[in-house]
Image (cartoon, rainbow, N blue to C red):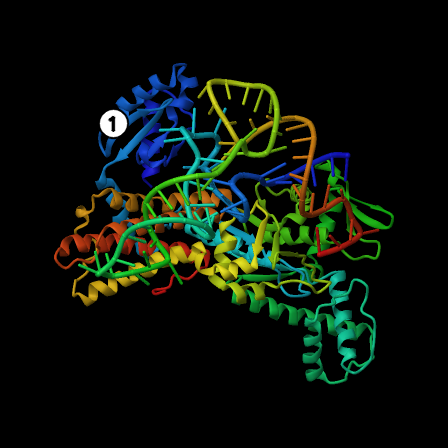
RNA sequence: GCGCCCGUAGCUCAACAGGAUAGAGCAUCGGAUUUCUAAUCCGAGGGCUGUGGGUUCGAAUCCCACCGGGCGCGCCA
């Protein structure tokens, strides 16, 4: 938080000069000092003077106090070197706040929601869902740190045509077990997993449904299939170490009248009309796009319809803002949803959609295309089994959602020990081992003491990284990018590895210095553990 | 055809809402352990940031055009 401290000081100086404008405080390349600001470069316009002159004036106002040096550089940057005492402050905060380090109150308890991993319960979750889960979980955890009251939810598309297809496909598989050959529908679910489900069903009910297909059988098969698929989803979530506060059923929105309620509301506002025996929503009233069907001519609601109802329910449940994480194939859905939110009179910032690009899988140099219906895919379960939970999560978190992600499975397995996740975890394990060493050598660890002995450049660097943890969380939240956190952790781990290489931490001939360094190690350990925890990755004590 | 996203080292990715000499890991080559975990550290090579224009003190980043890739444009979800 030294960064915000510098920002405040600059803002105050500007205020004294009667100015106010945006500027940056950043961490520059090492040779330029601890922190740096472009305030003079940006301010040149406002002051109508050359940047370097503006910088010199500001430097006069800023220097002293906790700033060891404040210098002009390059075209007009102001570089700061911070007193070691101020850096130790960060260390002290980590040591005293412990697991709570990183908690802020920016959200002020505002109730928000993240929705992700929403899926048709018709088959196994894919690696794309895995990416979504990791992005979602991480953002949820970060927003909690920022002081928001966050819930996560998965929307189950358990209504609609695909469920009917699933039910019938299961029925076909079930009958096959009795030697009755039926053809799977052209677009039916051909995956082998339905055969397993059919076997389980046969064990439970015997030949009760053999050869029979009517409305009540269909209903049974729908419910059975969905519940089996849901159980499977839950198991996969567990394998990846995720949990949801709530599963929300699409079907329930039709059954409990929410859909009807929206229709009535839209009718009242004259936002719907009938055409070709279907009911249309006037999207064009709000944005430059074609109107969309809400109710098909057979009387069933479209996905768009139920999704509007779903978001209405979110609002009614008291969420101030909601975030949906969707695959890029759904991006066309965004403008319509925004239009619908407007139609409902919700604030513009109520719904934020975070789009992530697709995951492609490569195995033996070949690209695998994923299709649930064709039954050909590498499941998320397979991936977790092959690569491991930690590496899977870390790998997904590491790449910005806006980038397509190519997962080379052979590489992931073969080089799994080179995965950066081990680099970070190793720093943690090393520190754990330091404390074992200290104990063996009967060095009593006194928390928070001797900290003023920490003053070398390497120690300063580590302390500076510790201080940046909160800034990192804020940046990651602002840009919806878990990758900011992974690069931070790698950075922190790196600074510690260097420090470790050049310094003996546990040295019985110098107990005070040892204690000081153990404190530094302790803080790094806490922050790494916390950061990995936010990512849903474990922090092993030995490796 | 129209719209959205992406294009950075051989590979996978960074670059903090325009900043200083574009950085890491992997891979390649060369170093460092009588001592706390070498899953580590240090060094070398490797780049016309897809191409061409523009905006300005300053562009990988913003604007325009093009090239290449992904996705979307259903009474699918």
- The quarter holding residue A176 reads bottom right
Farthest residue to the top: give it: A48
- Residue name at image x 36 percent, y 36 percent: A27
Image x and y of residue A533, in percent: 41, 58
- Residue name at image x 52 percent, y 52 percent: A135
Image x and y of residue A162, in percent: 74, 62
Image x and y of residue A108, in percent: 43, 47
Image x and y of residue A447, in percent: 21, 57
Residue B49 lies, with reference to residue A20, above or below; the image says below
Farthest residue to the left: give it: A509
* Horizontal side, residue A478 vs residue A77: left or right: right
- Whether residue A495 is visible here, answered yes or no, is yes
The residue lying toward the viewer, choosing from A492 and A163, is A492
- The quarter holding residue B20 reads top left
Q: What is the quadrant of the N terminus of chain A in the image?
A: top left
* Horizontal side, residue A475 vs residue A271: left or right: left
Residue ID for mark 1: A63
- Numbered label tally: 1
The residue lying toward the viewer, choosing from A34 and A255, is A34
- Whether residue A320 is visible here, answered yes or no, is no
How many C-alpha atoms fall within 10 Å of the one at disc 1: few (<14), some, or many (≥20)?
some
* Horizontal side, residue A211 vs residue A339: left or right: right
The residue lying toward the viewer, choosing from A262 and A476, is A476
Residue A228 lies, with reference to residue A207, above or below; the image says above
Q: Dot 1 lies on which element?
A: loop
Q: What is the quadrant of the C terminus of chain A in the image?
A: bottom left
Judging from the image, mark 1 belongs to the subunit labelled A
The residue lying toward the viewer, choosing from A278 and A234, is A234
- Residue name at image x 39 percent, y 43 percent: A471
Farthest residue to the right: give it: A276
């Amino acid at each position: 938080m030294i960064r915000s401290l510098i920002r405040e000081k600059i803002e105050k100086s500007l205020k004294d000069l009667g100015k106010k404008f945006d500027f940056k405080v950043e961490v520059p390349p090492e040779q330029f000092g601890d922190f740096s600001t472009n305030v003079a470069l940006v301010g040149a316009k406002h002051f109508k003077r050359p940047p370097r002159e503006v910088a010199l004036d500001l430097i006069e106002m800023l220097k002293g106090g906790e700033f060891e040096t404040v210098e002009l550089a390059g075209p007009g940057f102001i570089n700061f070197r911070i007193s070691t005492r101020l850096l130790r402050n960060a260390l002290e905060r980590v040591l005293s706040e412990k697991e709570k380090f990183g908690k802020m109150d920016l959200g002020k308890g505002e109730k928000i929601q993240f929705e992700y991993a929403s899926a048709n319960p018709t088959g196994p979750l894919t690696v794309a869902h895995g990416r979504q889960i990791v992005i979602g979980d991480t953002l949820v955890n970060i927003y909690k740190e920022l002081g928001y009251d966050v819930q996560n939810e998965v929307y189950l598309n358990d209504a609609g045509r695909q469920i009917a297809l699933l039910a019938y496909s299961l029925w076909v598989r079930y009958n096959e077990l009795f030697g009755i050959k039926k053809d799977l529908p052209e677009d039916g679910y051909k995956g082998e997993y339905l055969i397993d489900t059919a076997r389980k069903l046969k064990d439970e009910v015997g030949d009760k449904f053999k050869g029979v297909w009517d409305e009540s059988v269909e209903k049974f098969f729908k419910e059975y299939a969905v519940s089996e698929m849901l159980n499977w989803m839950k198991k996969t979530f567990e394998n990846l170490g995720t949990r949801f506060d709530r599963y929300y059923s699409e079907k329930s929105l039709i059954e409990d009248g929410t859909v009807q309620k929206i229709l009535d509301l839209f009718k009242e506002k004259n936002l719907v009309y009938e055409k070709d025996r279907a009911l249309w929503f006037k999207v064009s009233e709000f944005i430059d796009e074609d109107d969309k069907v809400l109710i098909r001519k057979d009387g069933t609601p479209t996905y768009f319809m139920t999704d509007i109802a779903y978001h209405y329910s979110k609002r009614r449940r008291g969420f101030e803002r909601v975030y949906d994480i969707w695959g890029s194939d759904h991006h066309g859905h965004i403008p319509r949803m925004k239009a619908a939110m407007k139609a409902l009179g919700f604030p513009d910032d109520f719904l934020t959609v975070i789009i992530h690009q697709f995951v492609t899988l490569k195995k033996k140099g070949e690209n695998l295309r994923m299709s649930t219906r064709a039954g050909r895919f590498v499941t998320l379960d397979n991936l977790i089994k092959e690569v491991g939970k930690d590496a899977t999560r870390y790998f997904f978190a590491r790449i910005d959602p806006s980038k397509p992600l190519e997962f080379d499975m052979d590489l992931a397995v073969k080089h799994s020990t080179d995965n950066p996740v081990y680099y970070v975890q190793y720093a943690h394990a090393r520190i754990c081992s330091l404390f074992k060493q200290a104990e063996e050598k009967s060095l009593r660890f006194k928390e928070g003491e001797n900290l003023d002995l920490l003053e070398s450049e390497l120690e300063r660097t580590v302390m500076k990284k510790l201080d940046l943890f909160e800034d990192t969380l804020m940046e990651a939240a602002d840009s919806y990018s878990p990758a900011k956190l992974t690069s931070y952790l790698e950075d922190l781990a790196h600074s510690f590895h260097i420090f470790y290489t050049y310094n003996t931490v546990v040295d019985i001939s110098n107990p005070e210095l040892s204690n000081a360094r153990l404190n530094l190690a302790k803080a790094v350990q806490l922050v790494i553990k916390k950061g990995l925890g936010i990512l849903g990755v474990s922090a092993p004590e030995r490796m």
